[in-house]
Structure formats: C-alpha cells, structure tokens
Amino acid sequence: MAITSANQLELLQTAEAVAREKMIDPGLVVEAMEESLARAAKSRYGAEMDIRVSIDRKTGKATFTRVRTVVEDEELENYQAEMTVEQAKQYMEAPQVGDVYVEEVPPVEMGRIAAQSAKQVILQKVREAERDRQYEEFKDRAGTIINGAVKREEFGNVIVDLGGAEAVLRRNDKIGRESYRPNDRVRAYIKEVRREVRGHQIFLSRTAPEFMAELFKMEVPEIYDGIIEVKAVARDPGSRAKIAVISYDNSIDPVGACVGMRGSRVQAVVNELQGEKIDIIPWNEDQPTFLVNALQPAEVSKVVLDEEAGKIEVVVPEEQLSLAIGRRGQNVRLASQLTNLDIDIMTEAEESARRQKEFEARTQLFMETLDLDEFFAQLLVSEGFTNLEEVAYVEIDELLVIDGVDEGTAQELQTRAREYLEAQAKAALDAARALGAEDSLIEFEGLTPQMVEALAKDDVKTLEDFATCADWELAGGWTTVDGERVKDDGVLEPFGVTLEEAQDMVMTARILLGWVDPAELEQAEEDVDGDATGEEVEA
C-alpha cells in the first residue's frame, strides 16, 4: 500500500468509523495510525532512526519526518537519531545541546507484512483506549445497581453485557441456584471495578447486602430523599434477610414506609431477590434495644451487654428459644451480623443455673483463699464482689456496708486478700524465671507476674519476643473462615487485656528497643488525623 496514492481522506474516515463503533476519541485512533505508519517507516529506513508521522486532522495527509537531537560529544551514541553541536552547524545556525532538527523524508511503500504489523498496532491501541474508556465510565459507578443482558455462562460465572462493556457475575455472587440463558435480563450490584494488566474487570453481585439496600432505595422514595436511612443489612441470600432503618422525620414510620401499601414496596424487593424473606427492623442507638428488635419475631426477657468484649447475652423464655435461634441458627446469625455483636442465647432456666454456678464458684473462692465460712463468703458475693483484687484494694467503706463487718474485720479481710495475691504473684514470678523469662520482660510496665508466666509458657521470654507479637496474639480476636466467625485465643486474654491495650504495650516495647522512633510515630498519627479532618471537611 502506498500512502501517496491512497485516498488520504480514507484514513480519517476509517478513524471516525472505528472511534464511533468503540465509543472512543477519534484522535486516539489517528495517533495509533501515526504510530503504526512510523513503525513501518522505521523498518524501511532503519530501526535506529527517529521517524515520526503526522496525519493532518483535516486533509488526512500523512507527513513523514526524521528527527535528530543535538547532544554533547561524549553522549553521542546513536548516529542516526543524534548529532553533535559541530555536526549540527551544517543544518542549523548556532545549534545548542537539546535542539532538535526535523527534516521531511519520502513516504514509504507499505508491503504486506508492514501493513499487517500496522493493523496490529492500531487494533492494540484501540483496545487499550476502549478499556480506559470503560474503566473511567464504570469506576465511579461502583456501589450502584445496573441492568444488563446475559451474554454467556462460563464454569458457573455469568458474563453480562452492560452495553459497551462486559461484567462478571461470579458463581458465589448469584442467589442460590440461579441459572441464566443468553439474552436474559439481569439486575445486579456493581461490587468492584478493578484495573488489571489485561484490562479492567467489572464484578457484579446479587448476594451483597448493599444490593438489597440499593433496591430499597429504588423502591422507597423516602430513602432516596434521605428522610429514611438504611443503617445495616444482613443477608442469607435467597433465604432470609434483616434490614435496619431509621427515620429522621418523626411523622414518618420507617418500617411502614419500607413495607408500603399492602406490602407493595417490600414485595418488589422480595421478587427481585427470588423470594428472600425480609425482616424490616427499626434501628436504635441503644445496642440492647436494637438487638431485641433484631431478634424479632422472638421475644426477649433480658439482655446483658459486655461492651469491652463486644459480646452480648440474650435470655429468652424456654418456648421462644427455637424461634430466637431460627432454623440452623439463621435468626441469631443474621442478628449478630446486623448488630456486629457476638450473641449468646440462653433460656431463663439456663441463665438461672449459670448464675447459681457462678455464685457457688465465687463463694468457694472466698472460702478457700480468705479462710471464711460459707455464710460470710456468700455475703461478699451477694454484695457484688467477684474476685480477690476487689476485696484487697476496694475502699474500706465498701466492706463496712456488709452486715456484721466492722473496721477491724474489714482490715483483716483486706490483709488476707493482699497476702494471698502477693504469694500468687511470687509463685508466678518464680515459675516465669524457671521457664526462662528475662528481666527485660519481667520489669516491663503493664505486665503482671501471672501475665509474664503465661507469655513464657507461650515461648515469649524477652522484650524482643514481646515486641514481635501481634495485638490479636495477645488479646485474641475473631477471624472469618468459610463465612463462619472463628475465635482466636490470645495469650493475655484471660487477664482481660483488650486489643487497644495490647497495641499500646507492643508499640511501647518497640519504642524502648529503638525499633520505632516516637517522633516519627507522632508525626504519622498527626498526618492520619489531618487526613481524616480533610475528608470530613470535603464531605
């Protein structure tokens, strides 16, 4: 193909047609053509030459030029694309390093191989431009619902045509045993738009909790207008779901608004989710109250919240137990996801038996350690004392409120408790040293002798060992394995060490060892606070 004999406007017409078809900028197609023609020219004139091609955007005329750059004598490496100041004097007046000399060269005849290569370059550039366009178009649509047509199914994954782009609805993001045929319409939530080497990937989901929230937003005008807010969603896709809502207008009932006249609004969402049963729950800032709502339709007798452990105990009547737990634990599991709390459910009889067992255990503890009779030990437990530390270090006035306890008796109780605790601490310290615990760990502020003994048993014997521990290894935590929450026991968890306390202790150890610069840490915290403030201002 000879550029000189071709219809020059044909280049622009081709670029326009390709750009229209792929919905990209025609200029990008023309740039791809310029690059392909330049590559073909280099194969004719020599790969070391800097040949450039410019296509006139109006006439379609392609101009071939050779570019040479002026460089220092010692930097001259490529004689075809570079020249020294001395060499440049025959082409330019007063040349300086960095100047560029451009001369036009004759157009090239494109043979079959060169034309094929040019075609590949153009196709590649067009594909890259199309991917970039699709990524820019869809990256800001993550978190919204989109409609598409099923293109094909591959190994259980559904490829969805979104009109100008393809998305993937993976097997585990489909509801139950959903199956699709080509050209079926599908509505899904854009879960993620990811840029990858081979192009962007759009991942859809019909099982994400956010999908249900967005469906309610489409069906309930009050949610769309911000009068009602969806605070939390928990789903067992295709089976059951719970959604917590709150109204910012006292005259509007959030549950009633979401249900709609004769259930029309919620039924539209249920139909889209393949018959998934939905419990609509009023959200409440008070966690126990919210949990009582979340466990509907079961009735709750009592709620005991342990905020530090993020754990909650729920007491229900015997006849309500199966309803509260739900089939295969579904009801309590969804309530746990909705409230983000670990829930223990027990009957009134079980709770009573447990309380009695705790009462007896504490009574026995005081009888053995303080050498008390059963009646006196029961008095201490009845007044709310749960351990020796409380007896040993509480204000003496709190002991004097117990019937029959005078000041001398109270002091004797505290003396016995402190002596026992000191003996325990000494025994733990001796055991820790016998296990190899070093002074650097024993003397670390915040660790009791019993904690040091527990660490030594777990092969943490020096301050260096302690500084390498992760916070969850010390305080314990929860991980999700195959969709189930699994408990990780912490070495110091039995001593009531929280995750925040574990983080502080480990960081202090690292600072003492010189692993972390306190000034840099403080600066990093300030930067994080500054970023957070900036985000709030922007929002």
Image (cartoon, rainbow, N blue to C red):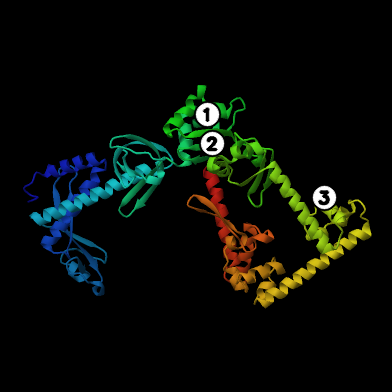
Q: Residue at x 30, y 42 (%)?
A: 165
Q: Which is nearer the eye, 239 or 194? A: 239
Lower sequence index among marks 3 and 2: 2
State left or right for residue 170 relative to residue 481. left
- Residue under label 1: 258
Q: Is residue 108 visible?
A: no
* Residue 382 circle label: 3
Q: Quadrant of residue 394?
A: bottom right
Of labels 3 and 2, the one closer to you: 3
| Cα–Cα span, label 1 and label 3 | 48 Å
Q: CB of mark 2 within 8 Å of CB of mark 1? A: yes
Q: Which is nearer the eye, 152 or 302? A: 302
The amino acid on which the numbered mark 3 sits, given as a three-letter code, is Ser
Q: Residue at x 27, y 50 (%)?
A: 128
State left or right for residue 431 relative to residue 266. right
In what element is the residue under mark 1? helix
